[in-house]
Image (cartoon, rainbow, N blue to C red):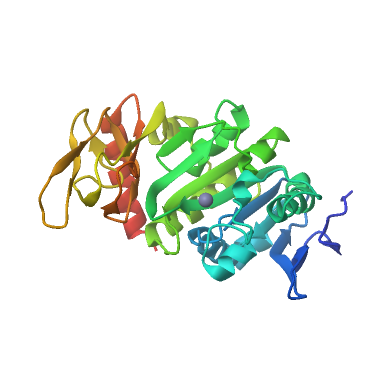
Amino acid sequence: MTSELVIGGVSVPPGKRKRMEIPVAKLYDYTEMTIPVEIIRGKEEGPVLFISAAVHGDEINGTEIIRRLLARKKMLSRIRGTAIMVPVVNVFGFNRNVRYLPDRRDLNRSFPGSGSGSLASQIASVFMKEIVDKCTHGIDLHTGGGHRANLPQIRACIDDAETNRLAHNFGVPVVINSSLRDGSLRQAAADKGIPILLFEGGEALRYDEKVIRSGLQGIISVMTAIGMIEGQKISMKKQREDVFIARSSYWVRAPHSGSLRASKHLGNRVKQNELLGVISDVFGQGRVNVRAPKTGIVIGMTMLPLVNNGDALFHIATFEDVAAVEEKMELYDEALESRT
Ligand SMILES: [Zn+2]
């Protein structure tokens, strides 16, 4: 007994791999905006996992992660269940190298959306109906926005047991527990009871090789954990040792305008009151120190050294044992380096 799977008006029978375009909007130049999707359906029924990227149109690391995943033809030909790959959700932003939609709206604040709302809201609504509603699990891929880079990390509502299990299986050392009511795809999927992980890493409009490897590895681990692919199961004990849940996180903002010379970087441990960087004016005068108010790990930072007073400079997550997180992050980073 196999159920019918229809996406974008196209039926995908078991054992087939199909590409299609889901119409989302008619534009004023008489062209149609469509979201390209590839569906891989195994012969055997099983979990239905969507993997989406570029909900923010300039966050392209995820698109490359999906491209590499799609190249694993042998692995994908043997999956149980169905994988729905959406390399570019915000096609408009992707084509123009921008984060938002033409109306400057943030698609990731427009979920679950409505058929009679703004363009962003309509796209969100189609995505929910055509993709999310048909899935049992989801992974949404992001990078830092606005000239900021992120350490590879998972954001998820780990109060949900299955989401917690998947967050541990993904395998990146840093997990941020968050259940924001923010109109994101993650929130809309979670509201429907679909366990979903958000992977963050790198910065917009750049490929970051380690982040791409980290995301690819994590997705394959999750596919294994939910029984889509055969693989070596990782023991619960090892997962607990390898993954750290942040207690909280905070932003350090620029106390002054000027140019920033950062002395701490992604993955670094910072102690309370430790120097993060120095801001000075263009003549090298008026030096102002930027310090960490609380001990933690740098999980995000600006890549643009020209800063205005109040700009977000460093995103720092706090943990029970920051030394253990830093050490694990170094080992993880080395492993990504050597992996091909
Ligand atoms: Zn994003």
Compared to 199, does 6 lie above or below? Answer: below
- In depth, the one of 248 and 17 nearer the eye is 248
Viewer can see residue 270 = yes
Q: Quadrant of residue 86?
A: bottom right
User: Which residue is at 38% across, 57% downward?
Assistant: 210
Name the side, left or right, on which 340 lies relative to 68: left
- The image position of residue 288, as x and y in percent, is 16, 41
- The image position of residue 14, as x and y in percent, is 81, 59
Q: Quadrant of the C terminus?
A: bottom left
Compared to 284, does 113 lie above or below? Answer: above
Compared to 13, does 194 lie above or below? Answer: above
- The image position of residue 265, as x and y in percent, is 26, 47
Give the mark count.
0
Name the side, left or right, on which 49 lies relative to 225: right
User: Which residue is at 64% across, 58% downward?
Assistant: 103
Name the side, left or right, on which 18 lies relative to 157: right
Viewer can see residue 16 = no
- In depth, the one of 107 and 223 nearer the eye is 107
- In depth, the one of 106 and 218 nearer the eye is 106
- The image position of residue 38, as x and y in percent, is 70, 64
Q: Quadrant of residue 237?
A: top left
User: Which residue is at 81% across, 61% downward?
Assistant: 8
